[in-house]
Image (tube, rainbow, N blue to C red):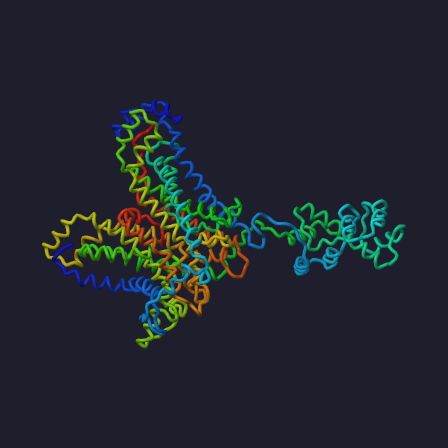
Amino acid sequence: MTENTSVERGINPGVATRPGDAETVKAARKGGPRISPFGILMLSPALLFLLAFFFAPVVLTAVFSFTNMTSATGITGGAYVISPNTLRNLEWQGMDKAVTESLSGTSITVDEAALSRAAEAGVDPDFLDDIESRLMGAHFEDARSFERELKTLPNRPRRIRDLKLAAEPFGQSILNTRFATRDQAVTAIDAVAPDLTEDQRDAVLTEAYTGWVWTTDNFKRLATTPATGRLLTNTALYVGLTLSIFNVGLGLFLAIAIFYMPKASGSVFSVLWLLPRITPVVLYAVMWRWFTWDDGFLPTLAAQFGLPSFNYMKGSVPTAWATIITLNGFIGASFGMILFSGALRAIPVQQLWASEVDGASRWQQVRKIILPQLKWPILFVTCYQSLSLLSSYQEIWLTTNGGPGNTTNVWALEAFRIALSNFTGNLEYGLGAAMALVLVVVGLTLSIIFLRLFKFGEMLEKPKIEF
Amino acid sequence: MSRNFASWPLILVLGLLSLPLVIMYAFVFIDSFTNAPPGSMIPNEFTLEHWQFLIDPSIAGNVWSATLNTLIFACSIGAIVVSLSSMGGYALSRLNMPFRQFFLAGIMVMHAFPSVTLIIGVFLVLQFIGLYDTLIGVVFVKASLMLPFGIWIMKGFYDTVPWEIEMAGVQDGASRFTVWRRLILPQVKPGLIALVVFSFLDAWGEYVLPRILAPTADYRVLSVYLERVSQKDSITYDFNLFKAVGLYYTLPVIILFIIFQNRLMNIFSGGTKG
């Protein structure tokens, strides 16, 4: 390795054997701690990947949330197309009718392109030679004056109908033609409708542009539409209930119950509750569908007991909520279970023995000894899982998909559906990115706050060997 | 843990709570091998007809090519994650470099950060670099989203290796790279195995990324395959067929999990699933 020499020079047993002295040794060195190019080399492949698929998406989400990008505008930028629709929209916006009519007219120009079009259309070559030699570069406002000019040529066709057919390829309408740049569009518009004012032309161009433009409308829309409030309430409800009942509540109960159990039955339960976490999400969703669907397990069972039996997953709002909270909670409970189990094993067992000698009941043990010592793990699980619940949509998407109606829709699912998966066909990347940006900002802020809370500094010890 | 209390009431309560899970998983197994009369849940005949999709592609498409695709998908992700994490984790754990604090904080934040929200941004990135609708693009994305977790886990494993081993190697004249490869990597083998199994399992179960980022490509992974089977028609829902497909799909996961259970437990608590 090329670093060899610098590595050897850097060996300083004094640093290595007394890590506590790192500061004094560092001070003794002139240039501060030596920097290892090897470290950068080792980290760079990972950094490259993170930059491309972690950092860049965050930036792009932020950037494109300020655009009106949809699948109709495309992603890489657009062209200028004046369609009959464009003209109709312009008229609605109060544009003069004369202007739109002049835009939909044709202009006639004799140039190479037009000549070759005419040759392709099967116009007599001698006639074309005439046109080329006499009228090259000429420009006509309408078809009649062009035809009048054609009638003076020696090789003109005998019949008027043929003459009209020969004239056709020279006419060019700007309607439905794609212009790649603004300049091309301006030239074309000037040719057809030269008496447009600058303002009118700009209005036409804005309307004719098919690409995306910068805008803050996404955020305005989010701030004003009543659906936002509904989504926020749903999200808060979903995160709050799942977290408190299952991720923390059930997780805690599982950990403590397994702690008090004989080892064999305890490990059976801990594996059982880990299953939802390792089961692929699609199968897990299908299992729940079977469990709650019309002729699935629960409705069949309920029918036999004379209870109301219907599709619990989509049939009514309360059962739909109960379904998504339970199915997400069953996945989340194992996270708390593992973490709390670890923390429980760290409690000195003598404390429990002592309390039993003093005649404490199991409930008293849990309340007075175990829970106080699980304070930090509980806080950690709450923080960590609230973040992942806030952004989770896969399970809801695969089961209720926000239904019935929009009653179980949450923010993350709505963002995902707007931008990437709806059946109306037009995917609104811009609006979806704006919604995702809200989640990104909330997620970043919360994770930074949480790291502060859990004494992030302690995790960042200096490397012991500094060379 | 203590004989002063009876444990059967606890087992009873926990058993009742776990009943939905037990029923769901038991019936995945039972239903894939049996038929039940309409209106009942109790099977009355043993059959292998639900497993015919394995040999008859007309039922649900070619399951073997989907399996091969999933295997390639999960293996490449496992390989990328474990190699980049073992390198990056070592750098962050042992080597001094500029912005080390910054990198560590960044990795921590990214690890805590819910990466599923990035899918819109990732979609745009793939569009720009031309990897949209390719398997390799999805592999890169999935591996990158797992990297912060992998690096953090590997850093933890490196932190527990006594640095005297490293010192001895360097004193004997080995380069830093040789020390890492020959002396340190064998020390963190449990971590490497746990990480590679974990990322394999995670990739094996991945659904959203292949479904959204590679929607029309010819290959299909098993998760998308299973979802297609279950989407057919909600009236003639053939639960038994997709239970058989589902069981087939999940079996490797369960087997790997049982084999590596203890090693995985070490790192499961760091997982980011809801």
Q: Position of residue A279 (x, y in %)?
A: 35, 56
Can I make out residue A419 in this image?
yes
Which residue sits furthest bottom?
Answer: A306
- Left or right, A231 with respect to A109, comes to left
Asked if B96 appears above or below A363 in the picture, the reply is above
User: For residue B92, what is the image quadrant?
Assistant: top left
* Total numbered circles: 0
Can I make out residue A367 in this image?
no
- Left or right, A208 with respect to A246, comes to right
Which residue sits furthest left?
Answer: A357
Q: Position of residue A354 (x, y in %)?
A: 11, 51
Task: Quarter of the image for the C terminus of chain A: give it.
Answer: top left
Which residue sits furthest front?
Answer: B55
Q: Residue at x 84, y 46 (%)?
A: A129
Task: Quarter of the image for the N terminus of chain A: give it.
Answer: top left
Q: Position of residue A439 (x, y in %)?
A: 43, 52
Q: Nearer the viewer, residue B204 or A200?
A: B204
Q: Nearer the viewer, residue B129 or A357?
A: B129
Q: Position of residue B236 (x, y in %)?
A: 44, 69
- Left or right, A220 with respect to A300, comes to right
User: For residue A322, what is the image quadrant?
Assistant: bottom left
